[in-house]
Structure formats: C-alpha cells, structure tokens
Image (cartoon, grey):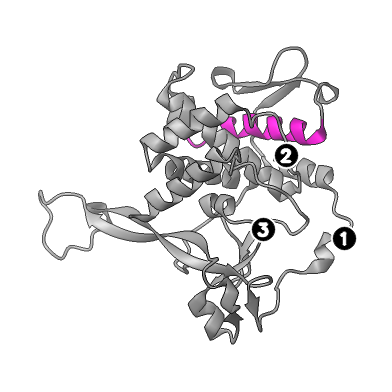
Amino acid sequence: MDAQQIVTNRLIEKLEEGVVPWRMPWNGTGVARRWVVDKPYRGLNAMILPPGEYASLKQIKEAGGRVKKEELKNWYMSVYWHWFKVKVGDAGVEDGSDDEANYKKMAKPYYYRVYEINKQCEGLASKVDQTEKLDFNPVEEAEKLLAAYKDKPRIQYGPGGAYYMAIFDFINMPKKEDFHSVEEFYSTIFHELVHSTGSISRLKREGVVDPTKFGSEKYAKEELVAEMGASMICVMAGLDTTDLQENSASYINGWLQKLKGDKKFIFSAASQAQAAVDYMTGVSHEEEPVPA
C-alpha cells in the first residue's frame, strides 16, 4: 500500500471516529516539530501529527537516544516528498540534454515512522524554548497574522454572512460581536482570506478562478483548502478550533465520501492550503530533502 493510501486511510479512520483531523488542537506546545532540524512540520504532516517533537528511529539512535521498548510499536507517520525530474517528451530532445525546459519537476510521497522524543524516547532533550510560552496572547498573534497578509482584499464588516467575492476581490464579514467566540471569528475570517489567495492576481487556484457551483468537485476541494489553511493559521496564533460547530455528521460524511473516492484528494488540498498560508504570511519555502 502506498503512502497516499495509508495517509488517506488514517484520515478516514479519524473522520469515522467523529474527529475532523484538520481542526487541530492547541495545548500550549504549539504544532508538531521536526526535532533534528527544530522546525515545525508543514502541510499534511501538521495535521496527522499531534503537537510534539518527532524524529525517526535512525535519527534518534544517531543522536544518542533510544525509543522506550514499550513505545516501539506506537510509531507515528511522517510523510515527505521525493522530488525528481522527468523528460517532457522526446521530440527534438537529444539524449543526455540537461536543458531545464526539457524536464518537469514531479514528486512522489513516502512515509517514515517517527517517535515523539519527550514521551516515547530517552536520552534526548527538547529543543523547544519553554520561555516563549510566557505572555502569549492568541488574539494579538492572530492580529499579527492578519496584518502579515500585505495584499489582502478589502474586508467589510456588516450585515450578511461571511463570504469572499472573487470578481470584486472583496470579503464580507459579520461583526466580531456576532460570533460566539474569538476562535469562531478568527477561524471564519482566515477561512475567507485563504479563499482570497486563489484569486487571479494571487495563486490562481481553479476553485476560485473558474466558476464553481455549490457541491461540485472544484467547490469541495476549494472548501477543504480554506478549512485546512484556516486551521493552520489558527494553530500558529494559538487558537483552538476543535470545538467549532462544523463537526456535524453531514459535514464529516461529505469529506468521508471524497477521501474514499480519491486517495490524492487530501494531498492536493493540503499542498494548496500550505501554499495559501505561505502566501498570507509572506513565507518563501523550498523543498526540504531531509525526511522525518
């Protein structure tokens, strides 16, 4: 079974348990991190791994640590992409040509077994600076993330629901006091802002640029991109979105059908969600070849 199917099956299991995996919890430790390089996981890994610091068995041994015997079978899965080039076609292309125009970049997912170094291992020290947790204000962090989106669309607060109108590059939002909680407010506005990154002047996502009917395949994927992206940003701000109202049976069943029908669906949506978050926060990211 390939990595895409394994990850999809795990997410299906979570949904069948009534857990929406892209609604990530906040428990004061932040997001899941790659222990060796001391960087947060991105994209899909940020959703399938609980908060903590992770390393592969090989990395743990090389660092002088060990996995507790009783924890060896309780591994977590980390997905990484192997990037390679394939020739675009043989017409007019000489063998051995290194011309970049003759090749396209592709990626294949693989998975590694990883362990949380604080709970499952011995002989390793955490790299998380505990002092960073002091005086942490989620609302202030959320406002900083809103401000980081330099070319965001115009936002109007007033009557009507929350929506992004691509043709006018405009977001309508209910007033803050109309929401049940600050988590609900920021989750909603980040959801609409993620939609806006797909505009023709930004990332040109199909679900935003092309006319999309409610319930269509493109609509469903764009909604998942916005859901995942908003959740990623809420975790960055320290906002817990796990208890919001979208965890309804019909909502969960809808995503179950999509995942069961296409093992690539979640990978593509997660990749686009991460690209949207990078765009909003001004992050330039290159592929990291280091697994785990």
Question: Which percent across, then down, holds residue 188?
Answer: 69, 30
Q: Amino acid at mark 2?
A: Leu
* Image coords of residue 275 (percent x, y): 52, 45
Residue at 60% of width from left, 78% of height from top? Answer: 68
Nearer to us of marks 1 and 3 is 3
Q: How many marks?
A: 3
Give the mark nearest the N terminus, 2 or 3. Answer: 3
> Is disc 3 placed on a helix, strand or loop?
loop
Q: Quadrant of the N terminus?
A: bottom left
Mark 1 lies on a secondary structure that is loop
Which numbered tag is attached to residue 134?
1
Q: Main secondary structure of the magenta part?
A: helix
Amino acid on which disc 3 is placed? Pro
Secondary structure category for the residue under label 2? helix
Q: Which residue is mark 3?
A: 51
Residue wearing tag 2:
146
Q: 231 and 117: which one is in front?
A: 117
Q: Earlier in the sequence, mark 1 or mark 3?
A: 3
Identify the residue at the far front of this view.
70
The stretch of residues the image draws in magenta is 181-204
- Residue 77 position, x and y percent, is 50, 60
Question: Horizontally, is 129 left or right of 96 in the view?
Answer: right
Report if residue 168 lies within the magenta region: no
Instruction: Report if the CB atoms under discs 1 and 3 are less than 8 Å apart.
Output: no
Please rate how many residues cluster around mark 3, counting C-alpha atoms within 10 Å: few if below 14, some from 14 to 19, many from 20.
Answer: many
